[in-house]
Amino acid sequence: MRSIVKSVAVSGVVLFVTFAGGTVAQAQPSAAASGNASTVARTSDGRAVNTQAAIAAVEAYWTPARMAAAVDLDLKDSAGTGSAAVPQGKPGSVAPALPSKGMASLNQSVTVGKVYVTTPGGTGQCSASALNSGKRRLVITAGHCVHAGAGGGWYSNFIFVPGFRQGNEPVGRFVAWTLTSRTAWINNSNSDEDMAIAVMNNGGIYGAKVVDTVGGMGLRWNWGYSVAVTILGYPAAGGFPGDVQYFCQGTTWNGHSQQVRAWCNMTQGSSGGPWLQEYNDQTGLGYTNSVVSHRHGDPAQMDGPYFDNDIKSLFDYAEGLSPA
């Protein structure tokens, strides 16, 4: 096991939404055919987050006091419900991207940040990272950071704060427009599919797209169960502060079912943080190969979903929902 240290390196409907680039119309792909599902992001009082007023309401909701009081969403302890580990399909990649706005490097990856959501029981927090795509609006996290799983519903007031550190928000905030996850997570709490991608409104200090502002991690799928990774996140339980980015490094293996496992003692709050191949501590970028999902009995290990064709399907689905 490697010790944790602080990072010093750096539905069939048409919606009309106003972004910085103008008004766009977006048709929603079929979820039934893809194994994916989505919802329009909403405020806690049920308003769709598709106007500047709704975006401002979500930002205003997240006061420092509410952020500090947010509960660390569980690292779910699950045996998994999928089939045995059989890597399938051809390996594929999406390259990472540097920010186009010239954001200076910080003492951690600014591409990674904190997620805050309103849950039926109160408020919750997770980790996430911006994800590169052609439309440059995506943020990747765990499924249980956007939806409660079987018998539950979608969370509201989803906000992403990249580069968060000890109360500082160096590049501002981004509010979700659409949330997506796998139907296997939503219907069955299948931890093999504990993955989610949010499509973000313009925001941050430039009023721009999230990837243009902070850069975007790359994505890899079907790369096998044994790869070297750097895991980033904001653990907030068991003595961790919750407001500082930490990392683990090591080589993954098949823990159980269609999941990868790694030595890492990060706790609740790190859920949704990226597992990165070829992480570059000068740029804060790498290739996302899983996300923090849950742990079992050993507090020094954690599991994440194996990224196969399902994550590529979710990526394409979210990108298809994203405005230009």
Image (cartoon, rainbow, N blue to C red):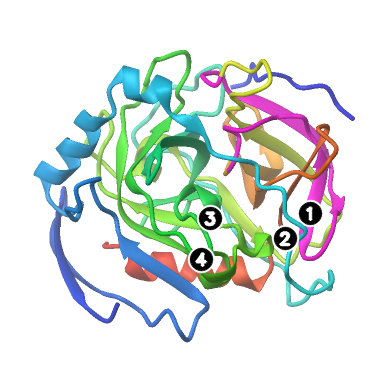
Q: Nearer the viewer, mark 4 or mark 3?
A: 4
Compare marks 1 and 2 and give the one earlier in the sequence: 1
Is disc 4 in contact with disc 3, using a CB cutoff of under 8 Å? yes
Is disc 2 in contact with disc 3, using a CB cutoff of under 8 Å? no
Compare marks 2 and 4 and give the one earlier in the sequence: 4
Is disc 2 in contact with disc 4, using a CB cutoff of under 8 Å? no
At 22% from the left edge and 78% from the top edge, which residue is drawn? 13
Compare marks 3 and 1 and give the one earlier in the sequence: 3
Is disc 1 in contact with disc 2, using a CB cutoff of under 8 Å? yes
Label 1: how many Cα within 10 Å (few below 14, some 14–19, many 20+) = many
At 35% from the left edge and 26% from the top edge, which residue is drawn? 171
Left or right: 212 with respect to 217? Answer: left
The magenta region covers: 242-271
**Res. 265 image quadrant:** top right
- Give the residue number, with chain letter if any, for mark 2: 306
- Give the residue number, with chain letter if any, for mark 3: 143
Label 4: how many Cα within 10 Å (few below 14, some 14–19, many 20+) = many
In the rendering, which numbered label is found on residue 186? 4
* Residue 303 visible: yes
Circle 1 — which element?
Answer: strand
Q: Is 49 drawn above or below residue 267 in the view shown?
A: below
Q: Is 185 drawn above or below residue 299 in the view shown?
A: below
Q: Nearer the viewer, mark 1 or mark 4?
A: 4
Q: Quadrant of the N terminus?
A: top right
Q: Quadrant of the C terminus?
A: bottom left
Circle 3 — which element?
Answer: helix
Circle 2 — which element?
Answer: loop
- Give the residue number, with chain letter if any, for mark 1: 260
At 48% from the left edge and 52% from the top edge, which residue is drawn? 132
Distance from label 2 to label 3 (Cα)? Answer: 13 Å
Left or right: 313 with respect to 193? Answer: left
Is disc 1 in contact with disc 4, using a CB cutoff of under 8 Å? no
